[in-house]
Image (cartoon, helix red, strand yellow):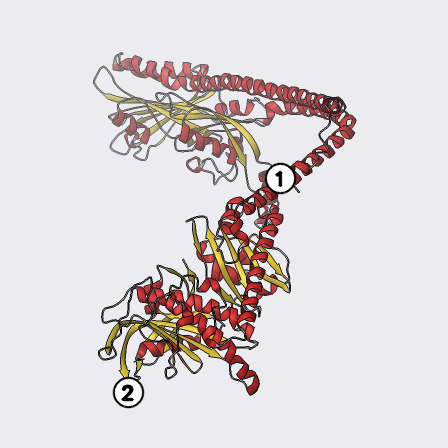
């Protein structure tokens, strides 16, 4: 139907559109605006609140970080600043006052600074003095003085109060104790500056101590070392007292990952097997802190955010209650965390302060408030959506109606385009014209990769390609043939008369054979097959490959399939009329039954008189191709070896039957076929064509020098002869099958016998062509040898047939000639 006759039911006056807008557009627009405003305000409020909270969190964490760092520095200052002050005093007073000054400073420091555990003083002569707090009573001190001698020295041990009152005095052997061999002494002497030793466990195992050692030289030039031991127990207690958030964590570690102070460190001091050297951050027991420490090692100090989502370890077997509790704890480790890391000055200690806080601790109330606001917003949106529901439904119906109309309009436009294209080229209705515009125009109209037109033989066992257009290279091809033995499923589906649409032809059983033989080489995938219907059913098909509009062009392909059907039926009617016309005339008055196969013949075949004593369909050397004689004839000298002869053998089977009358009736039809074969042989300038029993042998290239055109001319003739046989053999009323074989190679030829002499050709090439024909079991198959394939592959389409063994020649390859390029 022309597009001009399609009535658009949605085209109403302007007032109708205005009413539609007032009834549907305004309420829907109002609901949409309400939804946008409510949701926008809710999201903006939530995001603004959360962003402000996180910003405030960073400020608080920075302040807390500064406070913790300053607290640690203050905690260690007695060892650094106080130790430096003591060394300065001891190095500038006379030696006789050094011991008294040392005791005075030590007692004052122990009274004023609770974190100082003890003092060491040693010199290069091995003299050693230690003053430390007692474990039982922090207000008492113990003083040990070593005086080295020949017997290994002895210790003077004194107990007194911090005010200086002596409690007791005793002596005990020193057992050759040498302070100069201790690490705190050796490190200070080697570094010649203040050094820190790693944390060690106190003798009471109630905490860790670190030692700051400072070397100095007194006024007498004697080298000495002052060591201050700082207890870390108070620092651990300080970290435990921090209450930044309900789930915050704070620890102090060194650059080797050893934990210096942490809230849970107090619980480990009672374990006799625990050692401070192995007290590192454990990713299994504290994965969050381990992740924060890893980020410090990679990015350095500062504020970082990271997401933690620990896998559920419950898949591993657990037998103890502790493991079960640990698994339960691991399952809760999920979320975003904020970490702050700071490093103490190198002059104090290379320690790192780590603080980790879950982001939810600060943003939970913002999330709760946001959820409540969102709930109220959703209620308002639901009410507005409910009031506008009916109007939206009505608008949806109108949209569907509009889409349906556009679809119908598009179909009409495509139909008009197809009809205009067809009617603009009158030749498409002439069966004698190739009408290449059919495939080319349809390919452009549906944006396909390839479009082809196929004809089904009268017996329904063979499918022949009349024209194939490839949009990629813009070329036309034809002559490709498939039998029911090669594509049985496809022919069976085609004969059902329904359109076949497949997205992936390689996966559909109906068309997988056609994909393997025809589509795979072109790398096409989707397929749309429209059957061409005739008087007795399906007579052909229009095949479209890789069209993006395959689902919506069925109506267009039906139009083209109908046009192809008209052409095929017209050609069939014309052929039947020609056969009826020439059925009663003599052989000398026969004309060709297939005009398109003989339209280019320059000689009048009706004047060709076959020699009664000859078995040649076309006598040797009597034809030419485009007025060029490729094969000259000399009955006296035409003999010897021909280097490149192209030989074709057509082998028929099933002609002769036990019914003599029916076999005699075949003579008239054979005569008609011979006329057509003569026409084709003369058209392509073959050297000769002769019939031997149920075989027809055609030869080209009987020249002393190789003729490169001979195989090409013979292959063209083979395709035309096959088409003629397929058209005429079913009309004979016989179940005959035939196969065609071609080989190219050397052969020996000569004129033999008395006048009239007979030209005979023999050799392996003649035998191989006969073997190829006998192996072509499918009706009308053209099988060629490897040597023929090498000479024809640039001008024709082939598919591999496989390999086979030939005695005295070995393994050889055969190919199927599918059509012209």
Dot 1 surroundings within 10 Å: few (below 14), some, or many (20 or more)? Answer: some
- The answer to which quarter of the image holds residue 388 is top right
- The residue under label 1 is 410
Select label 2 or label 1 by which is in front: 2
Viewer-proximal residue among 631 and 472 = 631
Viewer-proximal residue among 694 and 380 = 694
Q: Position of residue 169 (x, y in %)?
A: 40, 24
Viewer-proximal residue among 370 and 265 = 370
Q: Dot 2 lies on which element?
A: loop
721 on left or right of 145: right
Q: Dot 1 lies on which element?
A: helix
Which is more N-terminal, label 1 or label 2?
Answer: 1
Look at 51% across and 40% down and name the residue there: 284
| Circles 2, 1 touching at the beta carbon (< 8 Å) | no
- The residue under label 2 is 754
**Quadrant into which the C terminus falls:** bottom left
Q: Position of residue 380 (x, y in %)?
A: 75, 23
């Amino acid at each position: 139907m022309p597009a001009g006759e399609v009535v658009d039911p949605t085209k109403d006056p302007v007032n109708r559109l205005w009413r539609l807008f007032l009834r549907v557009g305004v309420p829907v627009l109002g609901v949409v605006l309400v939804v946008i405003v409510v949701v926008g305000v809710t999201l903006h409020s939530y995001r603004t609140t959360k962003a402000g909270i996180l910003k405030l969190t960073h400020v608080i964490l920075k302040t807390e970080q500064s406070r913790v760092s300053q607290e640690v520095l203050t905690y260690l200052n007695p060892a650094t600043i106080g130790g430096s002050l003591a060394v300065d005093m001891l190095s500038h007073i006379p030696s006789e006052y050094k011991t008294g000054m040392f005791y005075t400073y030590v007692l004052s420091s122990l009274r004023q600074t609770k974190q100082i555990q003890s003092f060491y003083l040693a010199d290069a002569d091995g003299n050693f003095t230690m003053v430390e707090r007692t474990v039982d009573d922090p207000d008492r001190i113990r003083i040990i003085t070593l005086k080295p001698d020949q017997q290994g020295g002895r210790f003077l041990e004194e107990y007194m109060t911090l005010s200086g009152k002596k409690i007791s005095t005793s002596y005990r052997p020193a057992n050759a104790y040498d302070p100069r061999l201790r690490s705190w002494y050796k490190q200070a002497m080697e570094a010649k500056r203040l050094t820190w030793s790693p944390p060690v466990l106190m003798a009471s195992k109630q905490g860790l101590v670190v030692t700051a050692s400072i070397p100095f030289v007194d006024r007498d030039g004697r080298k000495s070392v002052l060591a201050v031991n700082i207890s870390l127990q108070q620092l651990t207690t300080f970290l435990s007292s921090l209450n930044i958030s309900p789930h915050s964590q704070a620890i102090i570690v060194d650059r080797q990952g050893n934990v210096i102070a942490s809230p849970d460190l107090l619980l480990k001091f009672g374990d006799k097997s625990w050692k401070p050297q192995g007290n590192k951050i454990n990713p299994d027991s504290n994965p969050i802190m381990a992740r924060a420490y890893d980020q410090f090692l990679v990015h350095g100090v500062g504020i970082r955010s990271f997401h933690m989502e620990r896998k559920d370890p419950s898949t591993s077997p657990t037998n103890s209650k502790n493991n079960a509790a640990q698994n339960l704890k691991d399952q809760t480790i999920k979320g975003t965390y904020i970490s702050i890391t700071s490093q103490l000055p190198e002059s104090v200690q290379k320690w790192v302060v780590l603080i980790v806080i879950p982001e939810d601790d600060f943003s939970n109330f913002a999330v709760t408030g946001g959820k409540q606001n969102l709930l109220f917003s959703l209620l308002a949106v639901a009410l507005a959506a409910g009031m506008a529901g009916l109007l939206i439904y009505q608008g949806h119906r109108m949209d569907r109606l509009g889409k349906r109309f556009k679809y119908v309009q598009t179909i009409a436009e495509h139909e008009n385009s197809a009809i205009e294209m067809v009617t603009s080229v009158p030749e498409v209705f002439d069966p004698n014209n190739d009408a290449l515009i059919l495939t080319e125009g349809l390919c452009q109209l549906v944006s396909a990769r390839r479009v082809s037109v196929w004809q089904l033989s009268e017996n329904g066992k063979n499918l022949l390609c009349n024209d194939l257009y490839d949009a990629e290279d813009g070329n036309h091809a034809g002559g490709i043939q498939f039998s029911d033995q090669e594509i049985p499923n496809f022919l069976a589906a085609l004969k059902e008369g329904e359109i076949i649409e497949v997205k992936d032809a390689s996966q559909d059983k109906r068309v997988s054979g056609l994909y393997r033989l025809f589509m795979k080489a072109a790398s096409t995938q989707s397929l749309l097959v429209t059957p061409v219907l005739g008087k007795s059913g399906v007579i052909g098909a229009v095949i479209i490959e890789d069209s993006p509009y395959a689902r919506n062009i069925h109506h267009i392909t039906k139009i083209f399939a109908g046009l192809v059907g008209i052409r095929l039926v017209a050609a069939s009617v014309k052929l039947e009329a020609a056969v009826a016309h020439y059925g009663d005339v003599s052989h000398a008055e026969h004309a060709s039954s297939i005009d398109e196969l003989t339209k280019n013949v320059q000689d009048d075949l009706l004047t060709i008189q076959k020699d009664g004593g000859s078995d040649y369909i076309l006598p040797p050397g009597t034809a030419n191709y485009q007025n060029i004689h490729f094969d000259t004839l000399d009955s006296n000298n035409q003999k010897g070896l021909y280097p490149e002869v192209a030989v074709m053998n057509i082998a028929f089977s099933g002609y002769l039957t036990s019914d003599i009358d029916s076999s005699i009736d075949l003579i008239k039809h054979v005569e008609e076929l011979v006329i057509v074969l003569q026409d084709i042989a003369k058209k392509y300038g073959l050297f000769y064509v002769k019939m031997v029993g149920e075989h027809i042998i055609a030869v080209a290239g009987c020249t002393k020098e190789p003729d490169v055109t001979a195989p090409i001319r013979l292959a063209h003739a083979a395709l035309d002869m096959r088409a003629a046989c397929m058209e005429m053999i079913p009309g004979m009323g016989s179940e005959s099958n035939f196969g065609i074989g071609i080989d190219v190679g050397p052969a020996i030829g000569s004129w033999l016998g008395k006048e009239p002499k007979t030209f005979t050709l023999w050799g392996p090439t003649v035998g191989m062509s006969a073997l190829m024909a006998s192996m072509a079991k499918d009706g009308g198959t053209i099988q060629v040898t490897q040597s023929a394939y090498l000479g024809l592959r640039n001008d024709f389409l082939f598919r591999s047939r496989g390999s086979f063994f030939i005695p005295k020649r070995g393994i050889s390859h055969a190919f199927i000639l599918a059509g012209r390029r």
